[in-house]
Amino acid sequence: MPELPEVEHAAARLREAVLGHTIVRATVLHPSQRRHFPPAAQKAVVGQRIERIDRRAKVQLIHLANGAVLEVHFRMTGDWEFTPLADPAPRLERVRFETAEGVRVSLVDGRAFGVVRLHKPGQFVPIVAGPEPLTDDFTVEGFIASLAKRSGPIKPTLLDQKLVAGVGNIYASEACWEARIHPATPANTLSKARVQKLRDAVRLVLETAPSGRYYARDDVNERDIWRVYGKEGDACRRCNTRITKLVQAGRSTFYCARCQRR
DNA sequence: TGTGCCCTGGTA
DNA sequence: TACCAGGGCACA
């Protein structure tokens, strides 16, 4: 799934492809997108130059010349595809932007969960999310204070974007494994030392995430990337115990019952 | 704090 | 052909 490293990479690809370009057409190709990006918004971006592209949490922010901001969230399966206008459109294209410079920017999104939203000039509200995990804002002290208020199991708690930005289901399992913390441990029962370990683990798994697109990444066997995610029944790399799967808050969690203790 | 919903391609 | 995957949101 596109989590922080993948979204960062997608934003970089988008910058490389169309920063400074002028949008000449925006088209919605899937009904689910019409709710968020209606025809009036599609018209409103025409003629606008792409001035800046930022990322905050898992959201890409495309700043247009008139001060409007296009907010793009890939959710589960979203990704960018860039093609010359003369080429056939990609499969599973949900939203299309065409630039005066001849580039077709397609939001491809199999499950159509992705969201494109336009904030009119002066109406952009900053994304509500916790500290960026790979910056100095993600402090041990702040993390300890946040977790002290949370009594739920630690792994689903890590998915709360207000706690720390950009961690998704895969890296939450991976971080708990790195920190040797059982995913069901109540967040507010973790010692300061273990919170510090977890904070370091979150940073480690995000920093060492494979670069490149998660989607259509065909040069690597995805299952080989992760330590525990998707590895139910496989041997733990540390202790050889079989990896266990459980469901927390409707999401799969993978962990080693031997080296991840409560 | 937990559950169900939105969605549909891929897989068993 | 049925089921699974899950980010974020609304709701209980």
Image: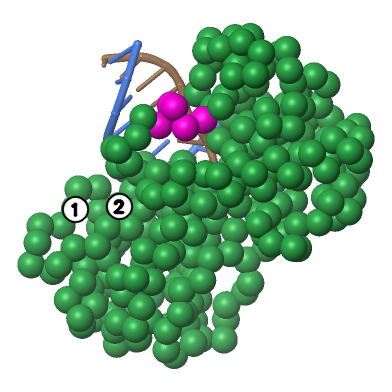
Chain colours: A green, B blue, C brown
- Residue A8 forms part of the magenta stretch: no
Q: Is residue A257 left or right of residue A48?
A: right
Circle 1 residues within 10 Å: few <14, some 14–19, many ≥20 = some
* Pick the front one: A73 or A255: A255
A30 vs A205: above or below: below
* Pick the front one: A215 or A26: A215
Residue at (30% x, 52% y) in the render:
A108
Query: Residue A115, position in %: x, y?
Result: 44, 57
Residue at (46% x, 74% y) in the render:
A53
A197 vs A142: above or below: above
Circle on res. A102: none
Instruction: Give the residues in magenta.
Output: A222-226
A89 vs A54: above or below: above
Q: Are marks 1 and 2 in contact (CB under 8 Å)?
A: yes
- Chain ID for label 1? A
Circle on res. A90: 1
Q: Is residue A234 left or right of residue C10?
A: left
Quarter location, residue A98: bottom left
Task: Give the tally of numbered discs.
Answer: 2
Q: Quickly name the residue at label 2.
A: A108
* Pick the front one: A96 or A86: A86
Distance, label 1 to label 2, CA atoms, is 7 Å
Query: Residue A28, position in %: x, y?
Result: 28, 62
